[in-house]
Amino acid sequence: MKKLIFLAGIFSFLTFTTGCASSKIPVSDISDDSKKSAEQILSELSVEEKVGQLFLIEPDQFDPKFGNVKNYKYWKSVPSAHKNAFERYQVGGFILFGGNIKSKTQLKKLNAQMTELCKIPPFIAVDEEGGRVTRLARTEALEIKNVGSMESIGATGDVENARRAGEYIGSYLSEYGFTWNFAPDTDVNTNPENRVIGDRAFGSDPELVSAMANAYLEGLHEHNVLGCTKHFPGHGDTKDDTHEKSVYVAKNWEELKKSELIPFVKTFKNTDSVMIAHVSLPNVTTDGLPASLSKELITGKLRGELGYEGVILTDSLGMNAIKKHYAPGEAAVMAFNAGNDIILMPAEFFKAYDGVLEAVRNGVISESRLDESVLRILKLKGF
């Protein structure tokens, strides 16, 4: 896969269209990485800014009312009262949901506004798989055609259909200022009773899933949109939903290597990131932890045995499989020490951020380990 050194250029355009804040890294330095390398930028960041880069959150999570008010109205633009939070915490990126989307003009302005408020250009992410998991295609005002389920595309047996789906989705995500799509779903759907994956997967054949996922990623890359394979080590052989409760996979490592792991390994060279599921693996790891918190699985097997070197992120830490059992700061520290680079949507951002910052200050997280992840993140942003 060709190197996608493009995010800085996209961010520069968005910043130019909204005005450039004085605290920003100069646009010329962002777009010309011979002037500003990832290593140089890393050396200029404070510990607080480094910790901020680890988090990818809903922008609304800067509002203390978020999650605590019934019928909460999602931000369609950044309220003036909360702009200081963007500047203070300097998070690595944001993910939008349907509640943040109202119209074509509003969506472009919101993404540009969030980018303009950050010293280091943030990722602007979304779950836009196609089929039942879409945010933009389900918003009538945007008038976007839904490409349909990945199961229906996989059933054609033609990888060009997956490539076209990825290319089409990438085209409109790029138009609206998104730089990262948490897709394609790379699970092998081996359990007919699976409620959470089902038609989100390309099928039950790991070789077919591998080919389709690679083609979909190539389609996204045509429009300079990052992709993400998920949900490692595989959510296809489950019945329950980690959004609701703890879920386990009974297969052992050798069994997973013969099926669920194949699409992940075969997309390593093409994907930009891997998302870790919250499923537990009692016949693989000895720590008894969900995959997203397991150092045995992430550092030992994904990085060590399988050799993946790119960015790793958790699934949302606000899901019940995590938040019912771990405090926000505890979960964030565990996830990072397990080997994740990015902490996605903790149940309570401020508590999670404070927990990680305290862990760095007291040595529970070493600054060298922090630098390792921030460097990966900066490079993924195109520096």
Image (cartoon, rainbow, N blue to C red):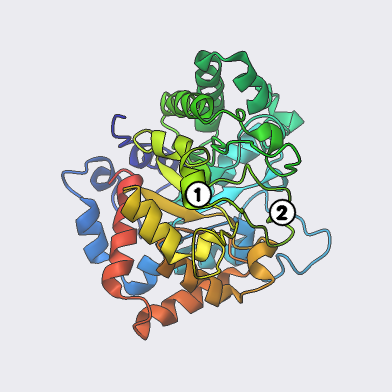
Q: Picture coordinates of residue 273 (x, y %)? A: 42, 45
The answer to whether 40 appears left or right of 86 in the picture is: left
The three-letter code of the residue at mark 1 reads Met
In three-dimensional space, the C-alpha distance between marks 1 and 2, rounded to whole angstroms, equals: 25 Å
Residue 162 image label? none
Image position, residue 289 (x, y; %): 55, 67
Residue 159 visible to the viewer? yes
Local secondary structure at mark 2: loop
Name the residue rendered at 44%, 26% in the picture: 223
Q: Which residue extends farthest left?
A: 34
Q: Look at mark 2 in the image and give the residue it sits on.
A: 74
Q: Which mark is residue 275?
A: 1
* Residue at 68% in and 62% down: 246
Is the residue 115 above or below the residue 102 in the image? below
Q: Nearer the viewer, residue 259 or 293?
A: 259
The quadrant in which residue 339 appears is: bottom left
Label 1: how many Cα within 10 Å (few below 14, some 14–19, many 20+): many
**What residue do we see at 40% from left, 33% from top?**
266
Q: Is residue 158 above or below residue 59?
A: above
184, above or below 51, in the image:
above
Q: Which of these two is toward me, 102 or 350?
A: 350
